[in-house]
Amino acid sequence: MPPSNASAAADSGPRPADTVRVFVALAPPDDAKDELSRALRPAYDAFPRMRWNRIEDWHITLLFLGELPAATVPLLSPPLAALAAGRPPLTLALRGGGHFDERVLWSGVAGDLAGLHRLGADVRAAVREQGVPFEDRALRPHLTLARARRDDPGSVVDVAAGLAGFTGRDWQPDGLHLVASNFGRGPGPIRYRSVATWPFTGPRANHRVDGGPGRPAVAPPPQH
């Protein structure tokens, strides 16, 4: 398990109480997270100074919304609930690993990537229709695991190399999650909490986890 004090530290400076920092995400099930955590045990022991995210906070971001007025959040529930209700769950897997600029460690995502990108596009459209502003970044699916300290960037590179051969089990997300973070709300580690969950209840379909013909097996690494 990652060290208890190892999540990334939030910067200081309180935010107004009437805003909330949120994003829409998918959450891997516990058994998929446990499988990846077991693969990371040697890294937890070898690199205890890395800022490891808590396993319960692991997620795959579909749309980052940033700071929103708290009164705006309820507007998102009807369209996102309707979107999820008409969708079958995707079949995904955690696979491989990489890093951003030798600072941020991530695990890759495999499976029905075409379906994942369609879902991401539909989430953006649903939020946009409510008049909620956001930065329209390209979706590069990944799961952030840890951040290196400024004086130890090599640790992320080493751990990413060790994850290159990791192949996780297939899993299906339970629904869309609206997640809030305490980033920028005082000292201490970043923590996440689920504000709302909208289940996928559409007809189930079978998907190849290798993505099928003509689809990449693993999501391309995120780019800045």
Image: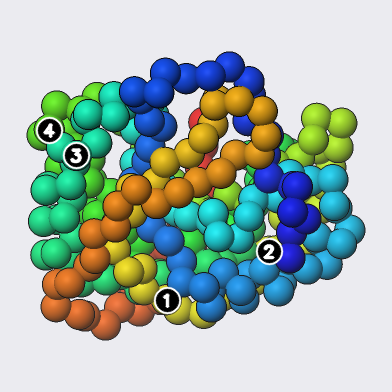
Task: Examine the image and state in which quarter residue 171 appears.
Answer: bottom left
User: Left of 113 or right of it: where is 205?
Assistant: left
Q: Secondary structure at mark 4?
A: loop
- Amino acid type, residue under disc 3 in the picture: Pro
Q: Separation of disc 3 and disc 2 at Cα? A: 40 Å
Residue that label 2 marks? 164
Task: Locate residue 215, reporting x and y percent.
Answer: 36, 64
Mark 1 and mark 3 residues within 8 Å of each other at the beta carbon: no
Residue 101 in sight from this viewpoint: no
Q: Amino acid at mark 2?
A: Ala
Q: Residues within 10 Å of mark 2 (few under 14, many from 20)?
A: some
**Marks 4/3: CA–CA distance:** 11 Å
Q: Which residue is mark 3?
A: 74
Quick check: can you spot residue 57?
A: yes
Q: How many numbered badges does the structure rendering display?
A: 4
Q: Looking at the image, is mark 4 or mark 2 earlier in the sequence?
A: 4
Comparing marks 4 and 3, which lies closer to the viewer?
Answer: 3
Separation of disc 4 and disc 1 at Cα?
31 Å
Q: Amino acid at mark 1?
A: Trp
Q: Quadrant of the N terminus?
A: bottom right
The residue that mark 4 highlights is 130
Q: N-terminal of the two: label 2 or label 1? A: 2
Q: Which residue is mark 1?
A: 171
Tag nearer the camera, 3 or 2? 3
Across and down, in percent, residue 48 comes to 85, 52
105 or 195: nearer the viewer: 195
Look at label 4 and name its amino acid. Answer: Gln
Disc 4 versus disc 1: nearer the observer: 4
Identified at 78% across, 68% down, the residue is 41
Residue 92 quadrant:
bottom left
Circle nearer the viewer, 4 or 2: 4
